[in-house]
Amino acid sequence: MAGGQSFRLSAANGRQGWHAKVLRDGADVNSQRNNARVLGWLLAFGVMLAGQGWAQIEIGKNTSMSLSGDVGFGYNGSNGDTIGSSHSTLFSGDAVLQGYYYNPRFLSYYVDPIYNRSQADSGEGSLTNASNVSAGVNLFSGSHFPGSISFGEGFNTSGTYGIGVTPGLDTTGKSHSFGIGWAELIPGAPPVNIQYSQTASENSIFGTSQDDHTDAKNLNVFSNYKLAGWYMGAHLTDTWTSTELPALITGTDQAVTGDTNSKSFSVNANHKLPLRGSFGASYGWSDFTGNENGSSYSGGNQTLSASAAFAPTDRFTSSFQANYDSSLAGSIEQQLIGVGAVTPQVDLGKSSYSISLNNSDNVVITKSLSAGFNVGHVEQVVYGETVSATHFSAIIDYRFLKPLWGTVVVYAGLNDEATEAGNTGAGLIAGVNFTKQWSNFELDGSFGYSQDTQTVLATEVTSNYSYLAKAQRRLGRRVRWLTTFNGFHTGLGEAEGSSAHAESYGTQLVYKMYNVGATYGHTSGTVLLTANGLVAAPGTLAPVLTANGSLLDTGSSYSFSFTTNPIRRLSFSTSYMRTLNDSLAGVAGAAASNSASKVYLMFTTYQFRKMVFTAGYTNLNQFVSASGLPPASYTNFYVGIQRWFKAF
């Protein structure tokens, strides 16, 4: 044939049942993972039972069991730059097998397999004929020692590697999960809960030849108890993570491989005080060790805190806090680990600690007027030097309700900070919230601004503002128009490259059973490199991160959608989304990568009796410059029917 290609038909009785395939160049371009075959047999067994009309099943005198779900049969086709073309008839479905032995409070269980749901994939934007199974057992739930076991396995599944706040890049891969839990609930004794879980995933960003791998193990032990008026609690966590990120994400010439073990322990106690008050105290310890690309890291910290709050009258409240942190760097590193950062390193010198005292008071002056005051002092050792700062703020809130203006809440205030170097100058705090219904309009809006707000470092301040606007209007008896606009901007006043900015816009028009919508979003700023994608750093921590710990990211996305239910039991939806992104490796800017993704979807269903007709279409185009490969495209469509069944 032309181009030196050969085509042939083959028939096989594989995990999809009997089906026909088109093969090119002698290769089976529609090969599936053999691990999912057991799911197909389980669903086929359920169909056999449903076809025989079994109403129930008995296994001994003490066992209760039920099986229900959906089974389907259809035609599937796909085509792509890297996978060739494939056409086949296939079997698909899902089921729920559940029951108990002797009594539900003694032993109950469930098994939920999903097999080859390509028709649902097109409706949800998935790229593959995904299969997965989840199962679990609950033991002795009616006793003082309940326990549970859970298991999950996913094959050929689709996902997303997030890029900042934009939708991100489409991925395909597999996943595994296992969990076990146990509790001691003896009356009069402190309750104890123990939970252990394992997760693993392997994903490939579509259009590239690189994978990311993530494995995690987590142990949690916690307890809460009341004794002599004291409410006490304790929590122990031990987490192991292993992560491998491809070079195309980091913008470097090598993958980032990291292993981290993080441990933490905390205890707390609370007690009531006179004047409608309360007292609380807590202690925390944390430690982590890890390595990244052969280099070892470690860190840890201990914290002590105490607080007291009073409300002597309905118009006045006051609270006091005292905090000690033995390692400021270790505290920041634990926050970064919490959002998935790979072996984060924070350099604040050989040793760093922080002591802070704070008082907050609030006074209700009139029904519409209130005032708040805050004063705090912090002393820290950073880079071997002792620094201290005293921060003061005062805010006035005024709320009024007028027929002409609607409901308006206005607040304004000042904050000031003084250090050994002198007074840094007053900063402004201001904002307004607005709600108004006028004729057929419903309006909501808010704006907030904060200048020179103290950050995690005593001598660093930041300024930020945010805004939100919503509008809704009835254009007729059955026509509604809605729109939203929101955004924020934040960044340190003295550290270059540590700001972040995002804004989004959305609009929607609804007429009877028709719905048309559009969205647009844009983001830029510093983000953290994690196994789950690029995420915003907690607080304002960018100035203390190492170069490989963060990226400068700029991205935008827009989408259009249309859904309708023109007649009863018939639904149709379609959408289009485009995402653009540019990332710069490290705050210093060593390498750059850009990516683009376009996804077009169509999906329709029609229900008749216990049958549902489904059809779906997905088209994806994706490009990542750092991969060195040309843009990749993929198209998938499905037409078929499915039927609900209840075997027993």
Image (cartoon, rainbow, N blue to C red):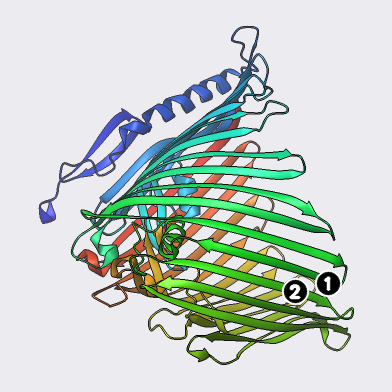
Q: Nearer the viewer, residue 364 or 310?
A: 310
Q: Position of residue 259 (x, y in %)?
A: 31, 49
First along the sequence among labels 1 and 2: 1
Residue behind mark 1: 316
Residue extending furthest top?
60
Q: Position of residue 321 (x, y in %)?
A: 65, 65
Q: Nearer the viewer, residue 476 or 578?
A: 578
Residue behind mark 2: 361
Q: Considering the numbered disc 2 on the image, is that residue within a helix, a strand or a loop? A: strand
Residue at the location (69% across, 51% down)? 568
Bin the neighbour count of mark 1 within 10 Å (Cα to Cα): few under 14, some 14-19, many 20 and up: some
Residue at the location (68% across, 54% down)? 280
Bin the neighbour count of mark 2 within 10 Å (Cα to Cα): few under 14, some 14-19, many 20 and up: some
Q: Nearer the viewer, residue 381 or 526?
A: 381
Q: Looking at the rendered structure, which numbered label has been put on residue 302? A: none
Residue at the location (81% across, 76% down)? 363
Q: Position of residue 463 (x, y in %)?
A: 54, 83
Looking at the picture, which amino acid does disc 2 mark? Asp
